[in-house]
Amino acid sequence: MGTVFKKLHSSKHNIDIGLLFAVTLCAGISTMLIYSIVKSGISEIEGVGDSYWKTQLISMCLGVAVAVGISFIDYRKLVKIWWIFVPITLILVALPFTSLGYQRDGADDKGWIRLFGLSMQPSEVMKIAFILTFGYHLSRDEEDMNKPFHMLLLLIHGALPIGIVGLQGDYGTAIVFAAIFAFMLVSAKISWKYLIAAPFLAGGVIAFMWFNFLSSFHKQRILILFHPGTDPENIEYQQDLGLTAIRSGGVFGKGLFAGKKEYIYVPELHNDFIFAHVGQVFGFVGSIGILIVLAYIVLKIFADSRITRDRLGRFICMGAFGLFFTHCLMNIGMVLKAAPVIGVPLPFLSGGGTAMLSMYAVIGLVISTYSHRAVTYNVFYDEDEER
């Protein structure tokens, strides 16, 4: 793998090698962590077997290829074939509402489908499509975006994916889409009047959701954060186990192969609560190390947004920034009992092939904006085309 990175770095195509290496480092650690969970036997109750770490390994290898492949395509050409990938995406996200949709064990939403013997979450594909289409929409409409009609169209564009995943019951992903939308919108030339109105609009939407859509179970997940230890249904049980697992790792952790008797079982340890396993395996020092790598990824994407050659590239990077920042904040906050359990995976660390590949695809888009910021590195680009 190191040889591959060196060749990419020395090639004429200007790969953001630091970003690609950081995400692949996390993916490699994720594979080892899931292997540790499987071999220790602590997640046998959830049926987590060898296929899980093998899927993670295969997804990592495919993900690197996907990211590099996308990076060679000029992002300005990619957005112009929206008429191809948008209909495909809409068909995929509609399938969970059919007999092909199912609710994964341990999940609250019916947002998964089975196709040709494989399971996937279409909302992961929709994240990529939304970043591309909304970035294109903003880049074409930025000068007029503060006119009421144009702002209404932008709001409708942002509300569509939020509404679709919300109807599937996936409120965590709905929040992620809202964050992507907000970061991209704020990075454009939005009027201060809309920024002042935004908190009031958001408050109204939250109140509407609270009284009309959230079940008592979801409400309790939120309320228990303000009154820990007062939960008669023991909803905070999973988070308490996660905190216990993190504390048990001490300063340097128990190691990857401590065994079933040493590790603490936490439901969804291989997936949404993977950071709890990071704590007990690598300890405080290792956990801080993982946080530093994740912070580097997020900040590097933000830095890349500042050096793109055009506003479309900036919007794509800011969409990616919103995606990864929100995922990290919500997932780690959930494990540390600072946020409700809401089913948002930790980028490149939580188990799941669809999530891994979609995250790599978004990284590929960011690298494309990095690679094509100079005309000499453009691929499939007409130099006479207006910037």
Image: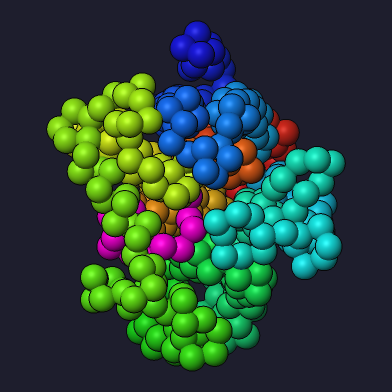
Main SS of residues in magenta: loop
**Residue 188 among magenta residues:** no
Magenta span has 336?
yes
> Is residue 221 in sight in this rendering?
yes
Quarter location, residue 64: top right
Residue positioned 25% across, 48% down in the render: 244
Left or right: 17 with respect to 148? left
- Depicted 58 relative to depicted 205: above or below: above
* Residue occupying the point 70% across, 41% down: 384
Q: Nearer the viewer, residue 111 or 220?
A: 220
Rendered image coloring scheme: rainbow
In this view, the residue in front, 202 or 29, is 29
Looking at the rendering, which quadrant does residue 118 occupy? Answer: top right
Residue at 72% x, 33% y is: 380
Q: Position of residue 299 (x, y in %)?
A: 34, 44
> Where in the figure is residue 293, as x and y percent of width and height?
32, 35
Give the magenta range.
333-345
**Which residue occupies 66% across, 46% down?**
76
Residue 269 is situated, as x and y percent measured from the top left of the image, at 43, 44
Does residue 323 sit above or below 227 in this rendering?
above
The answer to whether residue 226 shows anywhere in this view is no
Q: Measured along the vertical axis of the image, is residue 103 above or below residue 197?
A: above
**Outermost residue, left direction?**
251
Give the number of callouts: 0
